[in-house]
Image (cartoon, rainbow, N blue to C red):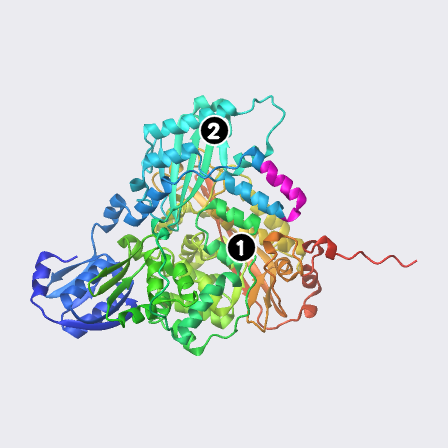
Amino acid sequence: MFTTALACVLAQQTQTVTLRANFLPVETVIQQISAQTGQPMLATGELKNFPLYINVKGVPLNDLLTRIGKTVGGEWSKRDGNLYLTLESDVRSRQDREGDPEIVKALEATINTPLKPSLTQSEIEKIGKDVEKDEKKAMEMVGKIFSNMYNPDEASMKLVQAIGAKDLSTIVEGRRVVLSSTPNQMQGLLAANSVNLIMAEMRKLAAKAPKKDDKAEDPMAMFGAMFGGGLSKPELVNKVSLIQAAFQIQKRNTLNVTINAYTPDGAGVYTKQVSLPLVNPEASRPQVTTGTPISLSPATQEYVKALGENSALDPFTSMIVNFNGNISSVMGMVIGGGEGFGQAAPPITKPISPALRAKLLDPVTNEPFALTLGEVLDAYASKGRNVIASPSDDILGSLVTAINAKNPTVEGVLDSIDRSITQEVDVDGTWTTVRASSPLELRSAFCNRVALKNLITGAGNRGYINLEDCLKFASQQTLARRSETLAIPYTEAIFRTSDMGAATALTGLGFDALKFYGTFDPMQRAALEAGKPIALASLFPGQREILGRMVFNGMVPPMGADNPLGGMFDEMGAKEGPAGADEDGDGMAGMAGMGMAMVGPMMSMFGMGGVTVMNERTNLLPSGIPSFGTMKLKRFNMKSLMAMNTDTGISTIGVPEMMAMFEGDNPASPMFGGMKRSYNMYKLAQQSTLMFTFDFAKKASYFTSLYDVTVDNSRTYRKDELPKKMQERLNPPYFTREEKVTAPPPPVL
């Protein structure tokens, strides 16, 4: 945005600019314009690092600079003859007030969508009868019932409507807003009509609740109350004194709502968790299927193809990276074996080309948008358009899908961007602008390219990513909201090594934890590794800030101070021993370790953990992390394998029991039925889970986990050359179907 004085100065200038910049940092683009026009100018502050595409021919300098400022959400000023591009001073507060206009539209469409009917008891019984006829439908039944629990009811939908799309749109990703009937300084006031709606729902449920002396209890109702919520203590409905409703938008496509009601002494009476997939009004527009064919360079084709195949390479990574906060859909996928599972990996050529490797290892060219969208925009600009682009990384997934589609066109790809929530493609005269619909969303797209190069280099040299790689990458990201999406999934796609634990390491679930641990100095790490607690009061200011964000944003689940889970970690560690398994690799120790590798991130993902009036995170810590409290670390190690297919170049790191599920002819679980893998060589490996527990002033506990892996590259084994215990763990009989298990030979008399 130009000041009036600056506009007058530039209006007198007649310079024109011809320039192509393929998603270079704004700072670099401004320097190139300055060198071409002789006008001193500079991009400052956090804005200078964000990627910007420009492809223009003979455009007036005034017009170009105006459009750059609008696209990146910056403003121009002039001092001492120099032009400066900076962030608008009030951009954050203004967006907090107004929200993202595209999200507003999506929320309005969402909360006005008719309620999805919940399954009736008779429908559930029918599903059960169908299962009796076909046992393969058992997991599908559980998935349907579980998903049904998170559907909104009439009361929760009325509550969302009462709050309104405009107010809800100000909840940006990574921030959680709590409205309460008795708010503190971290919470807003829940309107009286909203309180009345929730009270009416509780009283309605209480009237239908079975009496205490009723012997017959509905097991499905109990299951639903445990996971999806409901009325837990009907007799206390009239004693409710505190009602809280928490809202969070996750990954731009899901609105999560959690409602809790408590008595004055902290007894939980009612809880309801609702997951509302955002309805995108633009999705109903007819898709553009014709236009200019896309012709990509071989390196770009290879890169986009690899990204598109990544979900088939490691469905676990696909599930967690693509997790959108919709609890019901994820549980249906996990339990029922839906999308994200059941995909066999296609044959993939092992080495990446020298051309692609050169691009990936060059911090000037390894920007993911440059390797996907840049050449598409080049083709569009060649038709006489002036193009400027700085979209949000939200579109990376849909962008890859659109480019990998059969007979893709330039117009079709731009249409897929325009149809995404938070994205805009504006056509104005000879100009086409591709941008995020709000500056705040736009600024989240930046990823430190030198850090990405180092991550890719480590993976290429070693064949896998370890914790130190992840710590370095995360600690070098400042403003990036989802830089994690550019790391492990993309590196796996390129170097063809999937990792059953790393799927959680750089996702939004663990990214703040990585940044937190990455700030620790050697003395702090040594103390934690030795099992010594660290006082929260001794944390540096930057560490306290990250830990506060982890707590307030709901990225780690809370537990009551007396929760036995923390003690259980210590007890498990004592039983498992420092190695997590015996010298030969005990199978049960490996399975326990596999569980530990997943428990922290999975609990964070599904939002589990005790929630009471005493440990509800924003109620407990209204003014930041307390000085009184400690944190400690427990490490769980498990002997594992890197299994390789030397023909396809695909390798997988995991405990042997997991490999057995993939390699078995007929995996018992429907979830793994279509995930058959074939390996012919192995290396010994070790996976480690680092479990952090935080005790806040004896009022509540939180935990989160990190993951590490090492591979012994000194020797490669065939299966029959592996240590005996490893061979046994690779062939557990309980992972094959009953009809495949042969009876033991009769004893010799």
Q: Position of residue 651 (x, y in %)?
A: 56, 67
Q: Main secondary structure of the magenta part?
A: helix
Can residue 696 be seen from the camera position used here? yes
Identify the residue at the far bottom of this view: 354
- Direction from residue 135 to residue 276 in the image, left or right: left
| Residue under the point 62% across and 26% down | 216
- Direction from residue 106 to residue 123 in the image, left or right: right
> Of the numbered discs in the image, which one, if any, rests on residue 689?
1
- Direction from residue 587 to residue 446 in the image, left or right: left
Q: Position of residue 672 (x, y in %)?
A: 60, 56
Residue 131 within the segment the image draws in magenta: yes
Residue 548 within the segment the image draws in magenta: no
Q: Position of residue 242 (x, y in %)?
A: 40, 28
| Residue under the point 42% across and 58% down | 518
- Amino acid residing under circle 1: Thr
The magenta stretch spans which residues?
Answer: 124-136
In this figure, which residue is indicated by the disc labeled 2?
A: 269
Dot 2: element:
strand
- Amino acid residing under circle 2: Val
Front-lying residue, 517 or 116: 116
- Relative to 595, residue 496 above or below: below
Q: Position of residue 372 (x, y in %)?
A: 37, 67
Dot 1: element:
strand
Front-lying residue, 444 or 554: 444
